[in-house]
Amino acid sequence: MKIVLLGPPGAGKGTLAKKLKEDLGVAHVSTGDILRDEISRETPYGHEAQQYIDKGFLVPDALISEIVEKKFCTDQHELSKGYILDGFPRTVPQAQEFEKILEKSQVGFDFALYMEVELPMIILRITGRRSCPHCGAVYHATRRPSKEEGICDVCGSHLFERNDDNEDTIRHRVNVFMESTLPIVDYYEKRNLLRRVNGNDDPEEIRDKLVNEDKR
Ligand code: AP5
């Protein structure tokens, strides 16, 4: 399985990707996680990206494309066995750049999966999100809580709330999604490379749908 996940913030891209990684053994490449890691290590990429992320803007196409190209060319062998790309592409120029990256790395690509979710659900999900800084596990304070409040089930670290997970920034990120990312749903649809799923469904249900469709 070599797929790109498309969807507004809070659609459940990260949650589904982690499930697919765990159950199918495919790699999970999240551009949001890569950028947050660059920020925490105070790298030049991180310094540049932070000002955009905290306000809910997209980081520049050139910066993120360079990061993804490096990843695909370095981890070519692992990614050729299967990957879930979560958070890229997010603009039409990034989708065009992704085609060049695929050509260069020869990693392959199956389709883009669009996870559809409405705004009230997005706000409910993101304001309750709790993330693990160590292993990347994602919880929801009330809907998918960790066993012990504030503690990661997987590695025991203290969970945190992301800086960009406040209601104002979320509304802005949703607007950015509508303006900049929705056009690539059309981009993949026109190329017959798009599948849609309901982001309100459980990640387990979506996984089963994908696996069963693949067998047909
Ligand atoms: P990124 O980290 O990619 O954020 P995002 O796209 O806004 O998506 P989220 O991580 O907020 O949501 P998600 O869909 O993964 O939902 P999750 O599974 O966590 O990017 C952050 C920033 O980095 C961007 O704003 C931008 O600045 C920059 N960036 C990244 N890539 C870029 C690019 N290519 N170009 C330019 N800039 C880029 O779920 C959310 C919550 O809901 C969780 O609490 C979860 O437990 C719960 N949940 C999930 N699924 C379900 C379900 N089915 N039922 C019930 N609860 C659920």
Image (cartoon, rainbow, N blue to C red):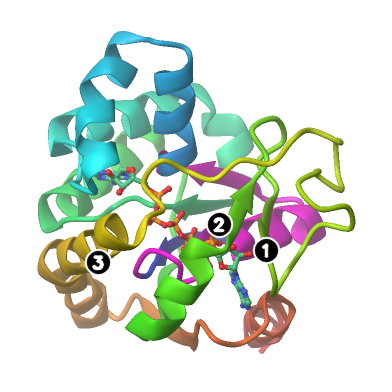
Query: Which mark is first along the chain, 3 or 1?
Result: 1
Q: Which numbered dot is residue 115?
A: none
Marks 2 and 1, Cα distance to the nearest angstrom? Answer: 16 Å
Is the residue 148 above or below the residue 66 in the image?
below
Instruction: Residue 95: say if magenta.
Output: no
What is the distance, in whole Å, between disc 2 and disc 3 at their CAs? 19 Å
Q: Earlier in the sequence, mark 2 or mark 1?
A: 2
Q: Residue at x 72, y 61 (%)?
A: 19
Label 2 crowd (10 A; few <14 / some 14-19 / many >=20): many
Ligand 1 within 8 Å of disc 1? The answer is yes
Q: Is residue 23 left or right of residue 118?
A: right
Q: Look at label 1 and name its amino acid.
A: Ala
Q: Is residue 92 above or below residue 105?
A: below
Q: Residue at x 79, y 33 (%)?
A: 157
Where is residue 107 drawn, in percent x and y?
Answer: 47, 43
Q: Determine the secondary structure under disc 1.
A: loop
What residue span does the magenta drawing correspond to?
8-31
Question: First in sequence: mark 2 or mark 3?
Answer: 2
Image location (x, y in percent) of residue 15: 62, 61
Q: Which mark is residue 171?
A: 3
Give the labeled residue for mark 2.
14
